[in-house]
Image (spheres, helix red, strand yellow):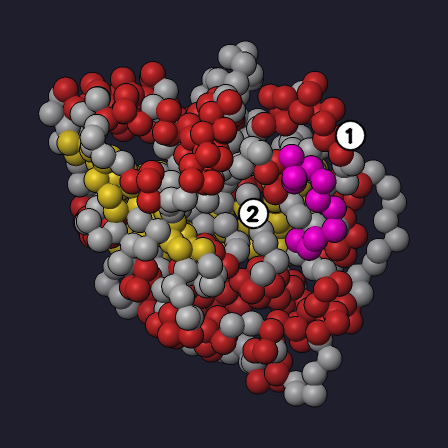
Amino acid sequence: MINWLKLILLMSMCSAMFLISCDFEENTKQETDFCASIHRNDSLSLSQELDSFEGLMDSLTGVYVLENGSGSIVARAWLCEYAEKTIDIQYFIFSLDNIGLIACDYLIRAADRGVKVRIIIDDIMVDADIQDIVTFDSHENISVKLYNPGVNLGKNIFNKIEKFTFDFRTANQRMHNKTMVVDGKVVITGGRNIADEYFDYDHEYNFRDRDILLLGKASKQVNNSFNEFWNSSFSKDITEVIKENSNVVYQQNRFDKLHEYACNPDNFWPQVRERIVHLPAAFNAIKNSGDLVWLDDVEFISDIPGKNDGNSGLGGGGVSTSALIDLVKNAKSSIDIQSPYLITTDLSRNLFREAVDRGVKVRILTNSLASTDNIEAFSGYQRDREKLLRTGVNIYEFRPDAAERNRIMTGELRETLEEQPIFGLHAKSMVIDKKTTVIGTFNLDPRSANLNTECIVVVQSDKISDGVLVGMDEEFLPENSWKITLDYNPDAEVNKVKRLKTWTRKVIPKAIL
């Protein structure tokens, strides 16, 4: 979700880091070689760990839901550490905080071993210096592309204003996909971007989020989708974006300095490093959990680059939109939804009304004004909240002080904080009839429906659905969310300033929220 008033501020950003920045160079001087204590187990490899599944992976898909943020980042780190051939990643946001720096370190270490790393990042949220990204790209085994450039990186304020003025629709078409494909065999996708707050490590604000890990058959679909984006005219090589011949070359010592910085526990919250110490056991824990389910009916659905032809203005939909509409239309008994941003239209409200009229129980959990990170999106939801309630849908709003944050956050981190951080919802999930589970990047709003490229995984499994519903049911409880009625909403729980800001955002067209 793009915070559209903050987009004006985004247009003036030009100096912060994205992947590799000079900022860490001032802090790399250290007397102790912490990197020396971090050893990769050379006796392990991804192919060896997958060997026991060899007979399953051609025809079936292994499915494991990553509910825990710290577990999800460790799974990513483990895959980077033991990848043998390729790592392909695409993200809407890739921040350079604790999690982001460690992620960069693991990617560079993989590239140093000869693993080919390809990265696609959407242009609009890149907060970086061009030369820093070019330096990262200059590694012989790392390639970086920017999706739909022209609104941020390398553009001055006048370029950006011109783009939004004369090419508004194209400027608003963003890549919201979040996938990681390792050796073409293992996938992680879902709601999480690469930043502290998506993995429960931020000290002030964290997200309740959800990812899904896929092994085998369905990974081919994700790999094909990534290649489609990589080869798309919307994805530009970073050197092409800057439109000049760069003199930046692969500087070994520069990458060494990043590694030194990332090894030093003084530069990171120790809870992050403590999790990584146990990295070698991460994949075995997944394999032996009993929650890795092998299925023959798993579908990965992704919009194509560019989404649609634009003949419908800011509308038009996409394949992910159509798939979700079909699932709602065919629901028989229940629809349980989590969506951080809930901006309805006549079409979506009619879909839910028809479902309720068929006897389908519909529950939706979204952010409250107190928990949301995006007041622009909330203003869009707020305008039609009563209309949605009148369809018969049950609406719940996530509490910023949700009791479950004590379970979500790692105990070590929780114990070090004087005050617990606010929690907001970021999971984008749906369970239909307690047997079909959808996990992905799709928010229930016009932007996801019509503009952003999105991707979802559709899983037909009672066990997977039961597991996801356990988390959902807990979050519907009063200690974690407020039940919304025609007579009650918790907007008054926030201060007047935030309420006023939300009211002023009502001038923003819902079509771009």
Numbered badge on residue 200: none
Q: Seen in the image, is 68 located left or right of residue 318?
A: left
- Whether residue 21 appears in this view of the structure is yes
Q: Quadrant of residue 165?
A: top right
Badge 2 amino acid: Ile
Rounded to the nearest angstrom, the CA distance separating label 1 from label 2 is 24 Å
In the current view of this chain or complex, which residue is farthest to the top?
311
Query: Quick check: 170 above or below 152?
Result: above
Badge 1 amino acid: Phe
Numbered badge on residue 158: 1
Residue range (magenta): 8-18
Q: Nearer the viewer, residue 369 or 233?
A: 369
Q: Position of residue 121 (x, y in %)?
A: 61, 44
Say what secondary structure mark 1 lies in: helix
Seen at 60% across and 21% down, the residue is 169
Say what secondary structure mark 2 lies in: loop
